[in-house]
């Protein structure tokens, strides 16, 4: 049976392991923290492979896409992508002189790159890490439609999960999909939330402190302006266009907007921007230490997302968040507690919450502090990554003997638990808040 490791001979010493991490977008943050914590753990003799995006061939195929065919899967884009990454990893094995059959552990993030697990000997323990499933992507995305032409992708993905000894999910949202949509035993699924390093508390409770009474970009006003921030590449998918137009139409004279993106809005599309800063190529350390702490409010109106690091980063900085009800965001933000949730694409709901924030700015620091406490409890890298590595060590040593009988979720604080595994852990704590 694929994934069994009961008869494999063991060697003394550190676990010989290969960690393969997709190295694009938010996966870069995961790779950085994983490498950092692996380097501090003597139990592993680990090689980390950063798997870059497909590059020129993918760019060429993307330009040749016919939207009507792509939307229903007739171009085979996702299938091609998974097979491309499979070959990419095989090539890395050959070039690096790796012998997969000698490994004590193979870890791959994400399942899009994990078809190579099917090429491993059944004796090699394997772990797949995910932030979503393709069924979730096709079901909830506004960019594709449910179609039978995606079924080959689902079948391949199911084979990957079946081959793995453990599936690690960033969220309850994705974990439930693995269990329900792909019929994977709950005992093989573990939630370990993605996280970042919690910075020192920098917010002194003041609002409007950076730009003062006159703001920036020519806006004026008697009161200090609210400082609104947006962080996200893929500007349109993340809803940056919706926020920018709304700000220019209704809030440019009352709030300063800072946009951090490597996909900046084009001047010919939006015209001259009033009271807006656009920052690009901001190093992560600078983002966390200098940019985020100067926001009074973080707005993330993404049209479709998974487990966005930007929301977690804002929470760790003590900044309240307005975000859309997409992906695992409702596991991060509880409406009215540490921020607000709005429907994806709803300009009216977003405007209403921004009006509330401006009218009730004195309440924002308290909401931000709740978010920081929540991040410290559930999304702190210094807790989650050692926990993940302990799990992986258990798989390497005894992959079929993990002491779990159901979907285990790395605990969240009682406030804001939205999914069945998390609620089961919290019991009735929420009722007492």
Image: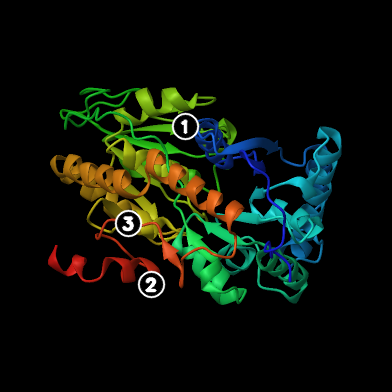
Q: Which is more foreground, mark 2 or mark 1?
A: 2
- Quadrant where the C terminus sits is bottom left
Mark 3–mark 2 Cα distance, whole angstroms, equals 12 Å
According to the picture, the residue beneath numbered tag 2 turns out to be 420
- Which residue is more in the foreground, 71 or 319? 319
Of the image marks 2 and 1, the number of the one nearer the N terminus:
1
Q: Are marks 1 and 3 in contact (CB under 8 Å)?
A: no
Dot 2 crowding, Cα within 10 Å, few <14, some 14–19, many 20+: some
Residue 89 location (% of width, % of height): 79, 44
Residue 333 location (% of width, % of height): 33, 54
Dot 1 crowding, Cα within 10 Å, few <14, some 14–19, many 20+: many
Dot 3 crowding, Cα within 10 Å, few <14, some 14–19, many 20+: many
Residue 431 location (% of width, % of height): 17, 69
According to the picture, the residue beneath numbered tag 3 turns out to be 412
In the picture, measured across the screen, residue 91 lies left or right of residue 432, that is right
Asked if residue 68 is positioned above or below residue 351 in the image, the reply reads below
In the picture, measured across the screen, residue 195 lies left or right of residue 368, that is right
In the picture, measured across the screen, residue 2 lies left or right of residue 110, that is right
Of the image marks 1 and 3, the number of the one nearer the N terminus:
1
According to the picture, the residue beneath numbered tag 1 turns out to be 260
- Which residue is more in the foreground, 63 or 79? 79
Of the image marks 3 and 2, the number of the one nearer the N terminus:
3
SS class, disc 1? strand
């Amino acid at each position: 049976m694929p994934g069994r490791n009961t008869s494999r001979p063991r060697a003394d010493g550190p676990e010989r392991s290969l960690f393969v991490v997709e190295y694009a977008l938010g996966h870069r943050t995961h790779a950085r923290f994983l490498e950092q914590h692996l380097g501090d753990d003597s139990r592993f003799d680990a090689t980390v492979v950063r798997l870059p995006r497909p590059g020129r061939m993918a760019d060429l195929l993307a330009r040749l896409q016919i939207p009507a065919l792509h939307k229903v899967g007739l171009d085979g884009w996702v299938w091609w992508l998974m097979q491309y990454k499979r070959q990419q990893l095989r090539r890395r094995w050959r070039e690096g002189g790796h012998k997969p059959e000698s490994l004590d552990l193979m870890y791959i993030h994400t399942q899009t790159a994990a078809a190579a697990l099917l090429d491993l000997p059944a004796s090699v323990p394997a772990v797949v890490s995910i932030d979503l499933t393709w069924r979730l992507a096709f079901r909830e995305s506004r960019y594709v439609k449910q179609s039978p032409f995606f079924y080959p992708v689902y079948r391949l993905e199911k084979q990957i999960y079946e081959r793995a000894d453990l599936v690690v999910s960033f969220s309850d949202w994705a974990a439930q999909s693995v269990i329900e949509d792909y019929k994977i035993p709950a005992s093989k699924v573990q939630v370990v939330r993605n996280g970042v390093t919690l910075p020192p508390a920098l917010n002194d409770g003041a609002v409007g402190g950076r730009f003062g009474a006159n703001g920036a970009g020519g806006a004026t006003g008697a009161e200090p302006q609210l400082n609104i921030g947006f962080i996200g590449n893929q500007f349109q998918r993340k809803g940056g266009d919706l926020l920018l137009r709304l700000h220019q139409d209704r809030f440019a004279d009352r709030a300063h907007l800072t946009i951090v993106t490597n996909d900046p809005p084009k001047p010919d599309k939006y015209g001259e921007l009033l009271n807006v800063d656009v920052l690009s190529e901001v190093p992560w350390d600078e983002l966390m230490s200098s940019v985020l702490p100067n926001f009074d409010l973080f707005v993330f109106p993404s049209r479709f997302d998974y487990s966005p690091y930007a929301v977690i980063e804002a929470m760790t900085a003590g900044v309240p968040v307005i975000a859309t009800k997409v992906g695992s965001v409702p596991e991060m933000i509880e409406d009215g507690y540490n921020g607000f949730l709005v429907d994806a694409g709803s300009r009216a709901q977003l405007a209403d919450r921004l009006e509330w924030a401006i009218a009730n700015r004195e309440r924002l620091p308290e909401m931000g502090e709740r978010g920081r406490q929540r991040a410290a409890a559930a999304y702190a890298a210094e807790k989650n990554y050692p926990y993940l590595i302990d799990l992986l060590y258990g798989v390497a040593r005894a992959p079929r003997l993990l002491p779990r009988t159901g979907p285990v979720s790395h605990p969240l604080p009682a406030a804001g638990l939205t999914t069945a595994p998390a609620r089961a852990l919290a019991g009735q704590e929420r009722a007492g808040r």
